[in-house]
Amino acid sequence: MDATTQAFLAALLGAVVAGSAALAWHISERQQSRMPAVEQPVVPPEVATVLSVLRSSAVIVDDDDTVLKASAPAYALGLVRGTSLLSTDLADLVHQVRRDGQIRETELVMSRAGVPARHVTARVAPLGSRLVLALVEDRTRERRVEAVRRDFVANVSHELKTPVGAIRVLADAVSDAAEDPEAVRRFAGRMLTESERLTQLVQQIIELSRLQGDEPLEAPVAVDVDKVIATAVDTSAIDADEKHITVISGGTKGLQVFGNEEQVLAAVANLVSNAVAYSDPGSSVSVSTRADQGAVEISVVDQGIGIPQEEIDRIFERFYRVDPARHRSTGGTGLGLSIVKHVAATHGGEVRVWSVEGQGSTFTLTLPEHLPARADQAVATAAGSDKTSSDKTREERP
């Protein structure tokens, strides 16, 4: 082998050795630089099972604030979208818990565009070393009820102070005018008016408190609509005569509704009383009835002051009056329409209003119809069934 060949082989061998060394170094570098696989946090199966049956809104997030698990109410409440928390306040609370591992509880107000604000209580706690659990309860209804109760108590206190204060002042006036019979009679008449107003207010507060729950009736019966309307019209007859208002009854006769007679009477009487109170002297009020697809509609039409369009949604609120300046002259308490609304709710019906300011209003109370023919047919069918069974029994006897 000549010198040239030996030199070529030596160079080739050197290249192979160098390439092998470079490849080995590259593989070693990749192995050293490769990071060990990080195990992703996993929601324990038993925790996921518990969350699936919770009525609360539950959310589990990892250390990257990614939502790993959320209950259906959490999506419905708007806490979660996809794998992200939508509430920044809740996300801040999660960060605090992750930082120090302390359980935290607070109240939050969640608001979104086009959606009413929701009042919630949030309890956030660590779940293992890397997960955080948030339990959220919607307290909006409770807060609304508390606000309504506070307003109701405040309004009742205010309304009661007016007649009570007036009676006290009038009593002092009667005492000072003891030697003036004419003044005594005048003040005594006003005391009687204020006492009647106080009695009406107390009675309506009691009635409204009984209807407050909007719960279904325990033992509904057939209620004669004609009788209810006649009694309601008669109740307002004195006030109507004083204002020379004609109250006209019409429509379909012989109808019956399914419910509580006392409550139905209270509702219709309040509608008729309001119509008379807010109608101009010399006008007329009409009460009509009709049956429509298993329901009875009782409509009360007046020619009164009417209701501004922007106030129609508020007229069923407690103590709300369309014209507060007139309530002293009409003797209203602002509770009548609230009672009508609750009676409709407890009977599974509704109350509607149509009104034009300056022209009058129409209130329509809709209640479930009681159909005697169907009831009699059911009784007859049951009796026939019993008779057939009895005949069959006699035939089977030896």
Image: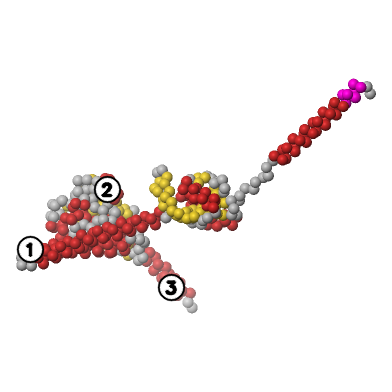
Circles 1 and 2 in contact, beta carbons < 8 Å: no
Q: Which residue is mark 2?
A: 311
Q: Which residue is mark 1?
A: 183
| Residue 16 vertical placement versus 44 (above, below) | above
Of the two numbered discs 2 and 3 on the same chain, state the one appearing first in sequence.
Answer: 2
* Tag 3 secondary structure: helix
State how far apart marks 1 and 2 are (Cα): 41 Å
Does the rendering let one see residue 368? no
Q: Nearer the viewer, residue 165 or 204?
A: 165
Q: Point out the stretch of residues depicted in magenta.
A: 3-9
Please tell me which residue is depicted at 58% across the width and 51% down the height of the picture: 130
Magenta segment, prevailing SS (helix, strand or loop) = helix
Q: Position of residue 274 (x, y in %)?
A: 21, 55
Image depth: mark 1 or mark 2 in front: 1
The label shown at residue 390 is 3
- Which amino acid does the dot numbered 2 rest on? Glu
Quadrant position of the N terminus in the picture: top right
Does the rendering let one see residue 157? yes
Image depth: mark 3 or mark 1 in front: 1
* Residue neighbourhood size for the residue with mark 3, other residues' Cα within 10 Å, grouped as few (<14), some (14–19), many (≥20): few
Please tell me which residue is depicted at 59% across the width and 54% down the height of the picture: 128
* Residue neighbourhood size for the residue with mark 1, other residues' Cα within 10 Å, grouped as few (<14), some (14–19), many (≥20): some
Q: Could you tell whether 132 is left or right of 339 in the image?
A: right
Of the two numbered discs 3 and 1 on the same chain, state the one appearing first in sequence.
Answer: 1
